Structures are given as C-alpha cells and as structure tokens.
Image (cartoon, grey):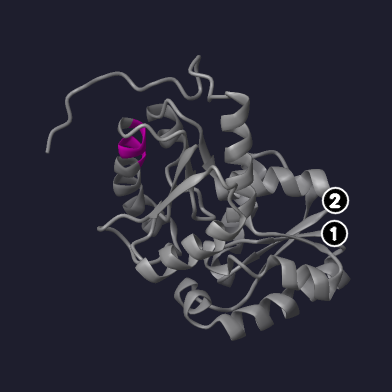
Amino acid sequence: MRIMVINPNTSTSMTEHLRQELEKIKRADTELTVTCPTVGPVTIESAYDEAMAVPPTLELVRLANREGYDGVILACFSDPGIHAAKEISDIPVVGIQEASLHVAAMLGYKFSILTPLARRIPHKHEEVRRYRLEDSLASVRALGMTVAETDADPRRTKQRILEVAARAAEEDGAEVMILGCAGMAGYAAEVERELGVVVLDPSAVALKLCEALIDAGLRHSKRALFARPPEKEFKK
C-alpha cells in the first residue's frame, strides 16, 4: 500500500524527523511518501497559521488521489483542513489529532494532551469538545516550547515531556498521555517506560490506523458530512 504523510507546515527538518520515525514502524509492504507544502507557515501555532496552511495542504491531498495513493495522513496536531480534505478525497484521510483523541479515550479513563505553547490550551479544549470526548479529558498542559524548539532541541523536548507528563499523571489523574505535536514524534516509548503510563505518539497512531482502514477497504461516507463539494468557478 502507498500512504502520503503530509506535514502541513513548510519545515523540511520536521518533515524529515517524521519520515525517520514513521519508517521505523511502518509495515514492510507500506510505501511512505512524507512531504510538506513549499508555501505556507514554517510552523503551525495559531488559527491563522492553520488557515494559511490549508490551501497548499489540500493540493497535496488532491495529488495523492491523482497519483494512486491508498491513504493520506495529516501530520499536524491541529488537523488543518481535515473536513475539506475528506470532502475532496476518495481515499482515507486520517488526522493525527482525531485519531489519537479517539484511541486515547479507548485506552484509559482519562487522557492528557501535552501541547507546545500555553496559548494553545483553549484550542485543544475546543477540539476535544468537537469530538464529544470532554468527559475523557484530564487536562491540557504546555511544555513552554515553540514548535520549532521541539524539533530543534530533542534533549530539552524529552525532558519537558517527562516533567509535564509526570505532573499530568500525579495531579490530574491522567492514565494516557498524548504528545500533542508532530515535533514530539519518537519520544513515546521512552516516556512510557519511565513514567509507567500509556503514551501516544499521534503520528504513529495515525499511520497504524490508516494501514488498518486501507486493509479493511474502508472509506469516508460521501452521503452528507464528507460529500464531494459541488463544482464551481473560483476567481483568482
């Protein structure tokens, strides 16, 4: 099977980091293309960044459909443009946030989300409510690092994840931790061993879910919510 993993920001270093981590866990018969847009924000840390990232991300979704891929992964924990991507796609589109929130709710009584910046905490609460999973949310806690810093400073990132996750477990009662940024890919196993709680790497969860959907021959329903948009003229 062929899966396109789209990092919706334009950071080539983060895209390469994702590729290296996902290549370690993909099935032997899975061919991955890990890519990012050439235009747009270098990191996604606001609603504005998300909005600017959507058009070039959707072009890559269209490309995956044209070139015969079997599935697409949106590898940003904001899942920018995910509903629009599902509308225009005939193959499964899996967002790393959507996938990991649902899986976390299956694996323990309460989960916590670790997000890079404190100002994004309200956004994460909104997203959890959108999926009607607020009863399963223990907390959203911030690392106090930018997305770029999580990518550039692995040692500090891992240390902050350990510190913040430990507080979420001890003070908030979280049984499952979600590493809420694609820049945190690759730390889950070590953090889980050290803290004794379940830790989800959303990019890894999304990859395995995407492989399973493809194997099962499942697609998004086109009846209403993800119906293909009507053809119309767009002025440029």
Q: Of all residues shown, which one is farthest toward the top?
A: 223
Q: Return the residue at label 2.
A: 108
Residue 184 visible in the displayed image: yes
Circle 1 packing at 10 Å, graded few (<14), some (14-19), many (20+), is many
Q: Residue 102 in the image: state x and y as whole percent.
A: 70, 42
Direction from residue 195 to residue 14 in the image, left or right:
left
State the extent of the magenta-drawn residues as a range: 61-65
Rendering coords of residue 154 (x, y %):
56, 80
Q: Residue at x 47, y 60 (%)?
A: 19
- Please state which of residues 103 and 235 is positioned toward the viewer in this rendering: 103
- Magenta: main secondary structure equals helix
Write down the residue under mark 1. 175
Q: Is residue 10 above or below residue 228?
A: below
The residue carrying pointer 2 sits among few (fewer than 14), some (14 to 19) or many (20 or more) residues within 10 Å by Cα, namely: some
Q: Is residue 229 above or below residue 127?
A: above
- Tag 2: amino acid: Gly
Q: Position of residue 218 (x, y in %)?
A: 58, 24
